[in-house]
Image (cartoon, rainbow, N blue to C red):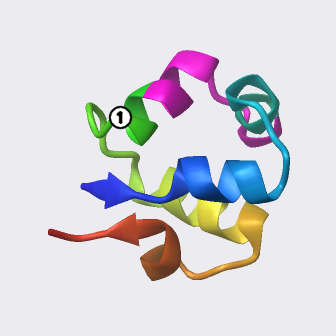
Amino acid sequence: MKNKIKVFRAMHDLTQEALAQELKVTRQTILAIEKGKYDPSLELAFKIARFFGVSVEEVFLYD
C-alpha cells in the first residue's frame, strides 16, 4: 500500500525517530511503512492519520 507519511513528516519537520516516538513504535517500523514493505495495522494507520490531523485516506493510498 502506498502512503504519504514521508510527505507529512516533511511538512511537520519530523524525523522518522521523532514520529516513531510519538506513535510508540520503532523507527524501523516507520521506515518499513514508508518504503511499502509493511502495511500497518488498522489501529496504527488511524494513529498516524490522527497525529497529522488528516483522514486515513489522505495518508494511505489503496492501489
Q: Residue at x 29, y 40 (%)?
A: 36
Q: Residue at x 24, y 55 (%)?
A: 1
- Residue 37 appears left or right of 7: left
Residue 63: image location, x then y, percent: 14, 69
Magenta span has 25?
A: yes
Q: Residue at x 70, y 69 (%)?
A: 50
Give neighbour class at mark 1: few <14, some 14-19, many 20+ (Cα, 10 Å).
Answer: some
Q: Quadrant of residue 33?
A: top left
Amino acid found under the numbered disc labelled 1: Lys
* Mark 1: secondary structure: loop
- Residue 37 appears left or right of 29: left
Q: Nearer the viewer, residue 24 or 60?
A: 60
Residue 51: image location, x then y, percent: 76, 62
Residue 26: image location, x then y, percent: 62, 20
Magenta span has 27?
A: yes
Q: Quadrant of residue 30?
A: top right
Q: Please, is residue 43 above or below residue 52 in the view?
A: above
Start and end of the magenta stretch? 22-31
Check the image and name the residue furthest to the left.
Answer: 63
